[in-house]
Image (cartoon, helix red, strand yellow):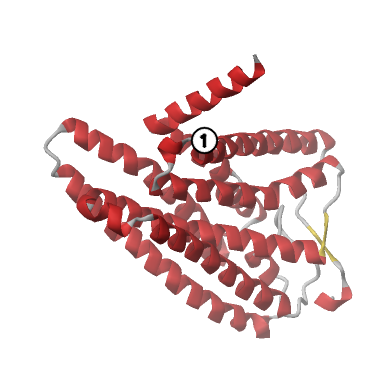
Amino acid sequence: MANSSSFNEFLLLAFADTRELQLLHFSLFLGIYLAALLGNGLIITAVACDHHLHTPMYFFLLNLSLLDLGSISTTVPKSMANSLWDTRAISYLGCAAQVFFLFFLCSAEFYLLTVMAYDRFVAICRPLHYGTLMDISACVKMAAAAWASGFLCALLHTANTFSIPLCQGNVVEQIFCEIPQILKLSCSDTYLREVGVSVATLSVVFGCFIFIVVSYVQIFTAVLRIPSEQGRHKAFSMCLPHLAVVSLFISTAMFAYLKPPSLSSPALDLVVAVLYAVVPPAVNPLLYSMRNKELKEALKRLMQWVQGQRQ
């Protein structure tokens, strides 16, 4: 049996066998990637350049867009290149880098979504204290804590995963490297180490999930008490995009990492991976801009400024 020290590359799952389907995969992922770049790039530019959006909510949205750009850039370009050049190979270090950055960016995004739930809670349930609790210093510290927590989790999991001897070859049954697929190649007697690390991480994730749920229970309770229909509509417009992003992210990621082995199959794993790692970064900008009047106006001003510069 091959040991992890006896090879210097992994073989990823081929998205398709025929050349036509490979080119279709390349074109589809290219469209999704360009949509993610455009959508998140516009949000980052609008928030950074428009002083009307220099508020805690949009500061966290800017961070979310940066994380989305990073996560989709970790997986999609390599998958596109493999289909375009009809190859499956990824270097050992490249695979480790994919695992690290994907786990880092996705973990940081989840922690940031937790912070954003707290921001919405304070804005709606504690409006008189919002300026004090969510000042610039507090926002920067919370965002930095989300990034740092994601980095530490990714470092711990990546180091632990790639320190385990791999005795089942180097074929990864996924279009990018992820921890569950790497662990399938490990020796059974060392698998318990990763289980211990995963339990510790899941405890933190579960705590964040409970915090988000409790926050939104209180938010919706407070919103339903607002007497005016216009006030309720404005409050829901602030919260529903974030709730949609949280639901999409948590449901797909939890199914990917917590589904029982009996449900695992290459086709299902592929679909779930695309749903949690590829689709959200492209869809999130649409979810946040659809019902957000301020963001739409900022984007309109940005477009008008660009057109004015061209003339």
Left or right of residue 170, residue 179 in this image: left
Image quadrant for the N terminus? bottom right
Where is residue 9, by image quadrant?
Answer: bottom right
Image quadrant for the C terminus? top right
Where is residue 238, by image quadrant?
Answer: top left
In the image, what residue occupies the spot 38% across and 29% down?
A: 293
Nearer to me, 157 or 149: 149
In the image, what residue occupies the spot 50% across and 62% down?
A: 144
Q: Which residue type does callout 1 highlight?
A: Ala
Give the answer, above or below, for where 96 lies relative to 267. Answer: below
Left or right of residue 175, residue 279 in this image: left
Nearer to me, 211 or 29: 211
Give x and y (percent) for residue 204.
Answer: 44, 71
Looking at the image, the residue that sits furthest to the bottom is: 189
Residue 255 at least partly seen: no
Give x and y (percent) for residue 56.
Answer: 39, 49
Looking at the image, the residue that sits furthest to the top is: 311
Answer few, some or many: residues within 10 Å of disc 1's Cα (few below 14, many 20 plus, some between 14 and 19). Answer: many
Q: Count the marks.
A: 1
Nearer to me, 242 or 267: 242
Give x and y (percent) for residue 113.
Answer: 43, 55
Assign a secondary structure to mark 1.
helix
In the image, what residue occupies the spot 52% across and 68% down?
A: 149
Give x and y (percent) for residue 109.
Answer: 51, 56
**Residue marked by disc 1:** 46
Give the answer, above or below, for where 222 lies relative to 10. Answer: above
In the image, what residue occupies the spot 28% across and 60% down?
A: 214
Nearer to me, 229 or 194: 229
Residue 199 at least partly seen: yes
